[in-house]
Image: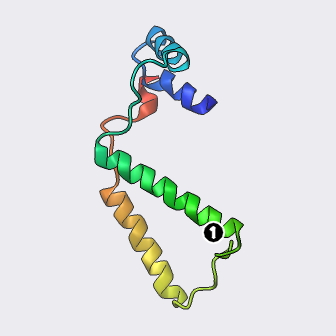
């Protein structure tokens, strides 16, 4: 929670704005919650959280194993897939116009 509140100071235009934002986060409970960029983003996020909770419940009740079983996929093929995934994330990932620390 402390890190999340500290990030406000990196994004605010001034220190006064940052303190105003932090004070409203901690005291202004009457304004509506920001639930994401769109209804789809919100529904997707909630569905993924629910999925993780179900997996955790299965693991707790020993329905699913806590640790992954050894894969039958050859090591070279797995690592090629990992590398391809990282390359795709790098190429298609979310980009920002400006690095967050430049505003600090």
Which image quadrant is residue 92 in? Answer: bottom left
Q: Residue at x 52, y 17 (%)?
A: 22
Q: Residue at x 34, y 34 (%)?
A: 98
Give percent across and percent down for residue 90.
37, 58
Q: How is the image coloured?
A: rainbow
Looking at the image, residue 86 lies above or below residue 48 = below
Question: Viewed as shown, does residue 44 lie left or right of 8?
Answer: left
Q: Nearer the viewer, residue 74 or 62?
A: 62
Q: Nearer the viewer, residue 74 or 5?
A: 5
Give percent across and percent down for residue 15.
48, 12
Under circle 1, the secondary element is helix
Q: Residue at x 37, y 53 (%)?
A: 44
Q: Nearer the viewer, residue 101 or 8?
A: 8
- Most extreme residue toward the top, as rendered? 16
Marker count (numbered): 1
Residue designated by label 1 = 58
Looking at the image, residue 63 lies above or below residue 23 = below
The quadrant of the rendering that contains the N terminus is top right
Q: Residues within 10 Å of mark 1 (few under 14, many from 20)?
A: some
Give percent across and percent down for residue 41.
34, 47
Q: Residue at x 66, y 75 (%)?
A: 63
Looking at the image, residue 8 lies above or below residue 60 = above
Give percent across and percent down for residue 43.
36, 50
């Amino acid at each position: 929670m402390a890190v999340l509140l500290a990030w406000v100071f990196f994004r605010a235009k001034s220190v006064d704005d940052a303190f105003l934002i932090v004070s409203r986060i901690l005291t202004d409970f009457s304004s509506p919650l920001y639930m994401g960029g769109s209804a789809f983003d919100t529904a997707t996020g909630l569905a993924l959280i629910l999925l993780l909770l179900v997996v955790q419940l299965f693991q707790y009740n020993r329905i699913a194993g806590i640790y992954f079983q050894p894969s039958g996929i050859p090591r070279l093929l797995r690592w090629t897939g990992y590398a391809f995934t990282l390359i795709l994330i790098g190429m298609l990932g979310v980009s920002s116009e400006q690095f967050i620390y430049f505003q600090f």
